[in-house]
Every structure is written in structure tokens, then in C-alpha cells.
Image: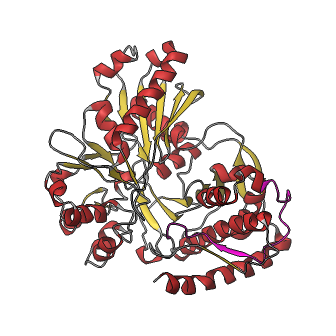
Amino acid sequence: MYLGLDLGTSGLKAILVDAEGHVIDTVEHHYPNPHPHHGWSEQNPADWVKACEAALDDLHARAPDMVGDLRGIGLSGQMHGATLIDANDTVLRPCILWNDTRAAKEAAWLDAQPEMRAITGNIVFPGFTAPKLLWVETHEPETFEKIAKALLPKDYLRLWLTGEHMGEMSDCAGTAWLDVGARDWSDTALGTGHMRRDQMPDLCEGSAVSGQLRDVLRQRWGIKGKVTVAGGAGDNAAAACGAGCFAEGQGFVSLGTSGVLLAAKDRFAPDAASAVHSFCHAVPDRWYQMGVILAATDCMNWLSRSLGQTAADLTGQLPERITGPSDLVFLPYLSGERTPHNDAQVRGAFVGLDVAHGPADLTQAVIEGVAFALRDCLAALSGTGTQLETVIAMGGGARSAYWVETLATVLGLPLSIPAGGEFGAALGAARLAIAADTGGPLEEIMTPPRIAQTVAPRADLADAYHARWQRYRALYPALRDTAS
């Protein structure tokens, strides 16, 4: 048996699979995500451990013999979080998460320093880890002085599981401390960010062994033998493992809390100025590029809270198929934006709001606004020379046929819908555990999911949506000037 653990922003998902990767059981446990000040987003790492303990307790209660046969654990996690520990492995402050924007000034300063973009292959975004440490140095100097290690969220969970300070390439590529092409820490980038190599975890590939499960935990859950803990992956690289996205031209679009358009790469070919992320993949000698928007289904969740209707009720007011773009435009910058704007200060807006507009109109505009933002990501990826041929749609928003058809038409790409089951980050983490334990061929372990249907772009509406996207794009400068 193998276990995949996906440490997300809202909760931890555990998935138990057999040696062939067939899903045996899944369980989720949630934890809070406090926002103590405007632009702040934090979590208590102890909550991650409690969630992991509860998930393993549940799986053991339901299938003690299968948990007893556990051979490997893989980890996936939310990227960029700054989990700071002292020389005794004690957490020094709440983890500063990926969607925290307090370090915008520090990020801009780091990004302007010579060699940073050349080394990391990326703009230094406010959500990355390195600027958060500069913020801590300025605002919490007593904490900064005590830092023995800076760990990413899933790597803190690994520390609890194994006792090892380890990281892996795909997650660490989002810190702004890694030489992404060389797949190693950069002393220059670290020094520029006022950090040292000894404050970093050791590195391994995501499909390699990072440590062994501690004996006290094996005994707690009645596990008979040694348990390999794989390097694992950042959440998007893990999702690519779950969806079998490794080859040039393969990719996925994710409509989750944030939105992602990811393309696998067989070489490192960054273009930082495009605001496209260029990161290491979870397996050796592979990379990936992606455009990221900070709010996708989060926009629908916001609308749901504001109108007092569930997201399902709102989308249920729309027709089964798209009929053309709305005259109302929504810009989904509720928490700022990454690709292509790199703007932590801009905020969202409805443009063209009329007294006749109701909940259905607002819902359609939100869906289209997220699709237009992902079209911006596709344009940025195309500008780097990246082309997508096969694209899998995943995430909560992909359960809406209306949203998927809108997105396919706006992107001008057919979108493949998997035939149910598990294929996301938790499964990718479990597959990395199989790879680390068995050393088997990656292409046989990480196969694409079975496709239930492929949603084609609506050729009859393509021009109308393209024109509305052009209007959408033209609105950003005015909105930016308003925010500043």
C-alpha cells in the first residue's frame, strides 16, 4: 500500500492506493486559514500535523490491515509558504502562505537585483518565499535571528514524519532561492535575500527517497515494515504527476481556489518578463511552465457569500450551453494578480453593471472573467514559445459544463474531462511514493487518466468571446491606476 498526502490551503487530503495505483480509500481533514490583517494569510503548522494524524487515524480505523502494509508515503503541498523553525525544530511564528501579499515591496526590491531573474528563471512574486523572509527580517528581527531552517509547508510535515530537513526541486523552485536550471540552491540568490545555505533543507528529486517514517509513527498505526517517504512535489507538479503530464505539449487547466494553466517541458526555457512561472518538475530532467491567477473558484465562493446563494444554485441559473458572452465584464483580481500582471495591489471589479442585471448575470460574468484571466495566461505561455496540444480540465470548477465550455471557447482549445475517480495532487503524491519505493519506470506509474469526454471550443461563438476578451484586457490599465 502507498499513501499520498496533499497539504492544501484549506485542508489535508490523504489517499491510499495499492501497488498498481488503484485507489483504496480517501479522507480529508480541514484547518483554519486566518487573515489577521489586510493582505495577510497565515496558518499554524501544528494544525497540519493534527490533520495528518486524524487522516491516518481514520484510514487505520477503516482498513487497519491495508495501513499495516504501507510501503511508501508521498507528499504534495501548497507552495511558497514560509515555515520558520529554530535549532530545536520549534516553529517560530505562523506560516506565511502563498496568497499573502504583505511582502510586495520586498519582492519588488529582490526582483530588481542583478542576476535574480537569470538564476531563478522567474519574476520574484510577493507570494514567493524569499521576500517573506526579508519582511520578517525588517518587522520581526527577533524571530529572524532565531531561524535555523526555512521549510515549505509539506516539508515541515515531512520533518514530523521522518525527522529529516529535506526539500525537493519542484516546490523549492518557487522560493526564489533555487537555481531552477541547475536544480540546486543558489548561494547568490540566498545571499541577496539575506539567507544562508545551511538554513535550507537538503534537496532530492520528487521521485527519490527523502527519508523513512519514524518508528513511533509506524507503531502508532500498526505498520509492519519500513516506510519510504518520497521527495514529493509542490501541488501543481504533483497534479501533473496525477494527470500524467510530462511530455512537451501536455498540460492541464485547474479551476481550483486559484487558477492554473500548466504545460510540461522537456527543457528549461524561462521567460521571466512574461510573468510565466518556470519551475522544476517532480521528476528528474523535466520542467514545467504555468500561468497562475490568484482567484478562480474563489471568485465564485465570494459571489456565493455575497448573494447568500450556494455556488451550485448560482450556476444552476445558467443554461446548459453557452450562448455568447455577457455584456457585463468581471475582472477577477480579488487578491491581486500574478500572470501576466505581477500586481499585488490591483483589485477586482464589475464593469458595465446595469440595474437589470441579476444573480445569473453576475454568475456568468464571474465565470467569463476567470476564463479571460486564463486566456491571458495562455497568451503569456504562447509568448515564450510554449504550445499546448492536449489539455485536461480539473478542479472544482471543471464540474460545471457551462464553465468548461466557456473556457474551451475562450482558450480556443479542446478540454478533456477525466472519467471520475482520483487524478489530482494527492494521487500524484502517491505515485511518487510508488516510484521512490520501487524504482519503477515513471511513464508506467504516472499514466494519464481515462477521458470521459472532450469539450470542443464553440467555433460559432469564438469571435464574440475573443472580442470580449480584448475588451477585458483593455480594462486592466484603468483598474491598475485606480488601485494605485
Q: Position of residue 107 (x, y in %)?
A: 33, 71
Q: In which quarter of the image is residue 69?
A: top left
Which of the two residues, 448 or 227, is positioned nearer the viewer here?
A: 227
Q: Which stretch appears magenta? A: 315-337
- Is most of the magenta stretch helix, strand or loop? loop
Between 476 and 450, the one nearer to me in the picture = 476
Residue 266 appears left or right of 368: left
In percent of the image, x 18 and y 57: which residue is there? Answer: 144
* Rendering coords of residue 114 (x, y %): 25, 78
Residue at the image point whose x is 25% and y is 33% from the top: 163
Left/right placement of residue 215 relative to residue 445 reads: left
In the foreground, 401 or 419: 401
- Number of residue marks: 0
Point out the image quarter for the C terminus.
bottom left
Q: Position of residue 356 (x, y in %)?
A: 82, 74
**From what the image shows, is residue 368 above or below residue 202?**
below
The answer to which image quadrant residue 334 occupies is bottom right
Nearer the observer, 297 or 122: 297
* Residue 255 in which image quadrant: bottom right
Per the image, is 317 magenta? yes
Across and down, in percent, residue 44 comes to: 35, 44
Q: In this view, does 408 lie above or below 72?
A: below
Is residue 440 visible in this depiction of the protein? no
Is 44 on the left-hand or right-hand side of 33?
left
Q: Identify the residue shown where x is 74% and y is 53%.
A: 400
211 drawn magenta: no
Q: How is the image coloured?
A: secondary structure
Residue 233 appearing in the image? yes
